[in-house]
Image (cartoon, helix red, strand yellow):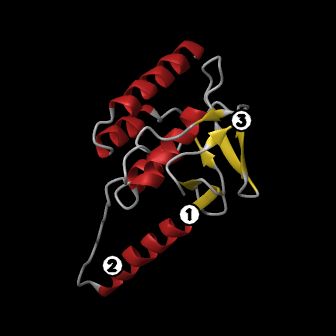
Amino acid sequence: GSRGFRQGNASLASPVARRTALAENQCHLETEDRLLQSVIDEAQRQAKNNISDFTPELTVLVEGAGYENVWLETQPMGGAMYAKRNLEVGLNNQLIFMGYQRSDGRLPGMISSLNHQSLKPDYEMLQGYYFPDPAWKIYFLIQQDKTYLSRLYDVLKAYDAYL
């Protein structure tokens, strides 16, 4: 998906969208141990199967194992880890939560895709809060983009005030 998406009338375009391309990331794990290599290959296949076009403009890494949503508790971290393979997906896993922050500072606990056309944030669950660390790590992977950092600061400050 592209490096931006929309929520209502508000653009949630990535601050790095103005660049021609995000860095091409690669991660290769190889071993001569055939059994271990088969485990590595299967893990990489499963991770790739968890990449979902939530909308035509937004590709994210979902929870997986039959859970086709993104949760605040896990998917910012999952995105940051997967960013070594696909930086755009890793960034989107942060921006999706940042973009659906309510005006009172509340972040959604979960976001669902409705037929891969629109998004449905859920604010009923107050999920475990591990978002700041992976969102901070993404900052370094996107070449320390100051616009992203400023936006992240505002999101975290507003959520802290909400809590």
Q: Quadrant of the N terminus?
A: bottom right
In contact (CB < 8 Å): disc 1 and disc 3: no
Q: Residue at x 47, y 54 (%)?
A: 89
Locate residue 152, reporting x and y percent: 44, 28
158 is higher (above) or lower (below) than 132? above
Residue 8, label in figure: 3
Give the residue pinned by disc 1: 50
Label 2, residues with CA under 10 Å away: few <14, some 14-19, many ≥20: few
Left or right: where does residue 152 sit relative to residue 57?
A: left
Locate residue 4, reporting x and y percent: 54, 46
Tag 3: amino acid: Gly
Q: Residue at x 30, y 66 (%)?
A: 27
In contact (CB < 8 Å): disc 2 and disc 1: no
Viewer-closest of 24 and 114? 24
Q: Residue at x 26, y 83 (%)?
A: 33
Q: Residue at x 55, y 69 (%)?
A: 49
Left or right: where does residue 124 sit relative to residue 56?
A: right
Which comes before the other along the chain, label 1 or label 3?
Answer: 3
Label 3, residues with CA under 10 Å away: few <14, some 14-19, many ≥20: few
Give the residue pinned by disc 2: 36
Kindly state the secondary structure of the residue where label 3 is placed. loop
